[in-house]
């Protein structure tokens, strides 16, 4: 088995997209980031990602994104796979951050479909092909049409998979379940397919997905990881039960733009200072009360800071 094949076997399960903590003065809180990563790994999270949508990368400078990646890499220390988000709306920034990910020893890089500028499919192909050709690191495409305003076509994904050996998978934050089925049909069953939609994490496993990258893992890392654990161990009933048990939490965490409800929840749990940088902000008082009620239902408000959830 090649090193790449071995990595693809490891890059399965719950890869948690860790939030970026800020201090009250808006500076990075790297100590809390380290603590969160330790908590995740102790709780059973299968992999760690930073600087994805949940990590507010568009609120960070390029230098801060490198700081977050470096801090996370040291905190993970090889205990689980590390897959930072390195994509940007700017091609050169994407190349720079992806090179940095390789330099710090990341297992793979997650590169988002460029947002705002709405590239065509042939332009997307050229962008990802250039990244893959320039930086020899296993790469996971991140397709999130609700944020980028463009959906990467299955044909484009399949073409990149065929032409770029180091493009090994895709995170699909895509509610079109027909689309994600066709990704595996056209790219092959060994292509790593991850759900970025919370209610599709379990269904994605059923069609042959490798796992999921779910924001909800930030609140209940152990339970989110256990959906995969039960599935992998053949206990389909328990996986389904946990899938439905997590649904109220999934729902309330997306009643405002991610990660605003998530940071409010983690603040209520005593995990961090619930601070976002403008133009993002915490949810309304009414929604925060609803979040608090849902957390109380799961027994999370009274949890000790060091306990597994």
Image: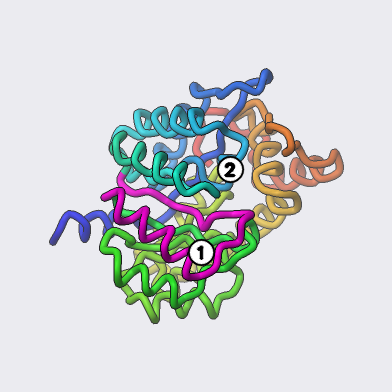
Give the secondary structure at mark 1.
strand
Which x, y percent locates residue 2?
14, 59
Report which quarter residue 170 is drawn in.
bottom left
Q: What element carries label 2?
A: loop
Relative vertical location of residue 202 with respect to residue 11 in this rendering, above or below: below
Query: Measuring 47% from the left and 47% from the top, which residue is drawn there?
Result: 16
User: Which of the image's four quarters has the N terminus?
Assistant: bottom left
Label 1 crowd (10 A; few <14 / some 14-19 / many >=20): many
- Counting from the top left corner in percent of width and height, residue 18 is at 51, 40
Tag shown at residue 218? none
Counting from the top left corner in percent of width and height, residue 87 is at: 48, 48
**Residue placed under numbered mark 2 in the picture:** 219
Dot in front, 1 or 2: 1
Give the answer, above or below, for where 22 lies relative to 57: above
- Is residue 51 inside the magenta stretch? no
Q: Which residue lies furthest to the right in this view?
A: 286
x 70%, y 57%: residue: 251
Mark found first going from the N terminus, 1 or 2: 1
The magenta span reads: 107-136
Q: Alpha carbon of mark 1 to alpha carbon of mark 2: how far?
A: 21 Å
Q: In the image, is residue 131 part of the stretch drawn in magenta?
A: yes
**Foreground: 106 or 226?**
106
Asked whether disc 1 touches disc 2, contact meaning CB atoms under 8 Å apart, the reply is no
283 is higher (above) or lower (below) than 36: below
- Picture coordinates of residue 75, whole percent (x, y): 38, 29
Q: Looking at the rendered structure, which numbered label has been put on residue 172?
A: 1
Depth check, front residue: 244 or 208: 208
Extreme residue in the left direction: 1
The image quadrant of residue 280 is: top right
Rendered residue at 50%/45% (across/down): 17
Front residue (pair 217, 170)? 170
Q: How crowded is mark 2: few (under 14 residues within 10 Å), some or many (20 or more)?
A: many
């Amino acid at each position: 088995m090649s090193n790449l094949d071995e990595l693809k076997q490891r890059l399965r399960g719950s890869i948690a997209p860790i939030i970026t903590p800020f201090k009250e003065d808006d500076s990075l809180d790297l100590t809390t980031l380290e603590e969160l990563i330790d908590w995740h790994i102790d709780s059973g999270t299968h992999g760690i990602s930073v600087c994805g949508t949940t990590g507010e990368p568009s609120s960070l400078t390029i230098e801060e994104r490198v700081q977050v990646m470096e801090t996370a890499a040291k905190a993970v220390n090889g205990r689980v796979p590390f897959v930072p988000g390195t994509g940007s709306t700017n091609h050169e920034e994407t190349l720079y951050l992806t090179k940095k990910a390789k330099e710090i020893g990341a297992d793979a890089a997650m590169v988002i479909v460029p947002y705002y500028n709405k590239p065509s499919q042939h332009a997307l192909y050229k962008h990802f092909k250039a990244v893959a050709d320039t930086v020899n690191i296993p790469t996971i495409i991140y397709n999130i049409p609700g944020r980028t305003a463009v959906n990467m076509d299955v044909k484009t994904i399949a073409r990149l998979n065929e032409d770029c050996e180091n493009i090994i998978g895709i995170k699909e934050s895509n509610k079109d379940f027909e689309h994600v089925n066709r990704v595996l049909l056209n790219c092959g069953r060994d292509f790593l397919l991850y759900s970025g939609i919370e209610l599709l994490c379990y269904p994605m496993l059923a069609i042959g997905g490798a796992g999921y990258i779910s924001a909800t893992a930030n609140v209940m890392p152990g339970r989110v990881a256990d959906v995969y654990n039960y599935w992998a161990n053949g206990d389909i009933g328990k996986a389904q039960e946990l899938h439905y048990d997590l649904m109220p939490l999934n729902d309330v965490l997306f009643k405002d733009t991610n990660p605003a409800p998530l940071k409010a929840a983690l603040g209520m749990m005593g995990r961090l200072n619930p601070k976002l940088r403008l133009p993002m902000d915490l949810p309304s008082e009414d929604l925060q009360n609803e979040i608090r009620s849902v957390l109380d239902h799961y027994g999370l408000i009274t949890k000790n800071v060091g306990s597994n959830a």
